[in-house]
Amino acid sequence: MTRTRTACAALLLLASLGCAGAPRKPDAFYQPPESLPPGTPGEVLRMEPLEGGPSGARSWLLLYRSTGLKGEPVAVSAVLLVPDGEAPAGGRPVVAWAHPTTGVAPDCAPSLQRNWKTTIPGLGAMLDAGWVVVATDYPGLGTPGPHPYLVGESEARAVVDSVRAARNVKEASAGNRFAVWGHSQGGHAALFTGQLAPRLAPELTLVGVAAAAPATDLPALFEKDLGTKLGNVLTAEALWAWSRVFQSSIDSVVVPSARPVVERVGLLCIRDPAEGIAAFSEAMPLRDGFVSAALSGTQPWGSIMRENSTGAAAIGVPVYILQGTGDTVVRPSVTAVYAGSVCGRGTPVRYQVAPGEEHFLVAFKFSGDAVAWMSDRFAGKPPPDDCVRGTK
């Protein structure tokens, strides 16, 4: 199959996954109080039943408390799914799903999609296993922005606090053991959760980290992607978000004629093929080059990318990494180097290669493997380890 035919097939499948009616806009549910009252991370601020969920489970939309980058309280939205039936002694295991890039504007939250249940790879199998599934939108998506895009501490806090929120919902009967499963930006979030969860949420027990095509070395990935259609969109969205989160002007790195284009692209979502095509069209003026200097060598962008690359701290639980060899968004060579670094710290790593597989559907196509791996972690089985270990 040619690359063009493969891309078309991917678009068709994505359309079936994510295009059932226009996404909703954030309504009053997503609007937190102007000043959050005192409370603790994971506190449920409000919840309501959510329509369109899978059979055999109950679904809710949550607004929960988390912590911002300056230590301030922030509200984050999430979807919570609880399987029918009695919970086991000790409570149900929890899987925190961390979603891939959907955009950086408040309208881009996955929970706003009409068929949101199709955006979580392996959802049916996880519910059949009796697990609670909680899917954060991350701060600034759904709720008022800015969204700290690819900012590891923000993502990790949103993930662990979503697990806390699930445990605060009586109907969930959620225990304190959880796994995190993410794709692309969500893989980045999952890996940062593995690094930071012991500090952020010592009362929770993380059993494993599963990441599909994770963003790891941000300077390398942005350098390789810049100039491609999707790479230009992602770079524009990153600069748009970071300029607001870190209060820095993009003038230091974006040519003057491209600044209005970056502003427009930053407001667009890329949750489905229709939105992606619109973003590509809007970003067309960027195709001839819009970055005036190397991002990694220009401040504050270089520091932002380096500080939010994974690997600064060890992950103390088993890791599962899935990577397609045909991925031109998250490059296999970059993921392989990262996996080697995790191995070098002594962490057991299951490194699964998907021959020829591209970026967008790898998590869906191989979700069964990820769910089986997480099931073994909840069962306490010895983790598989593809690392090459030296002998003494």
Image (cartoon, helix red, strand yellow):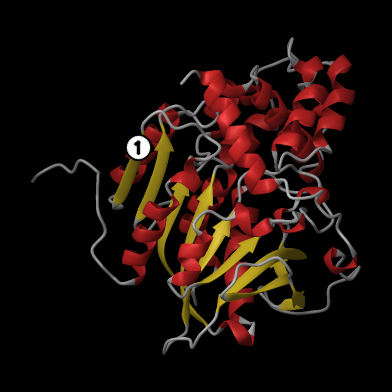
Q: Position of residue 243 (x, y in %)?
A: 79, 37
- The correct choice, above or below, for 228 with respect to 302 in the image is above
- Asked if residue 36 is positioned above or below residue 181 in the image, the reply reads below
For residue 206, which quarter of the picture?
A: bottom left
Q: Is residue 348 left or right of residue 327?
A: left
Please identify the residue farthest to the top as the structure is shown: 288
Q: Please state the horizontal and vertical placement of residue 255, each as a whole percent of the image.
A: 82, 16
Residue under the image location 71 percent in, 48 percent down: 148
Q: How many marks?
A: 1
What residue do we see at 88% from left, 70% from top? Answer: 35
Give x and y (percent) for residue 269.
77, 41
Q: Residue at x 35, y 45 (%)?
A: 342
* Along the viewing direction, whichever of 347 and 307 lies nearer the viewer: 347
- Asked if residue 362 is positioned above or below residue 176 in the image, the reply reads above
Of 19 and 325, nearer the camera is 19
155 left or right, relative to 369: right
Q: Which residue is mark 1?
A: 353
- For label 1, the SS is strand
Does the image show residue 345? no
| Side of 294 relative to 335 (left or right) | right
Q: Viewer-proximal residue, 85 or 46?
A: 85
Q: Position of residue 68 (x, y in %)?
A: 72, 59
Would residue 283 be visible to someone looking at this image? Answer: yes
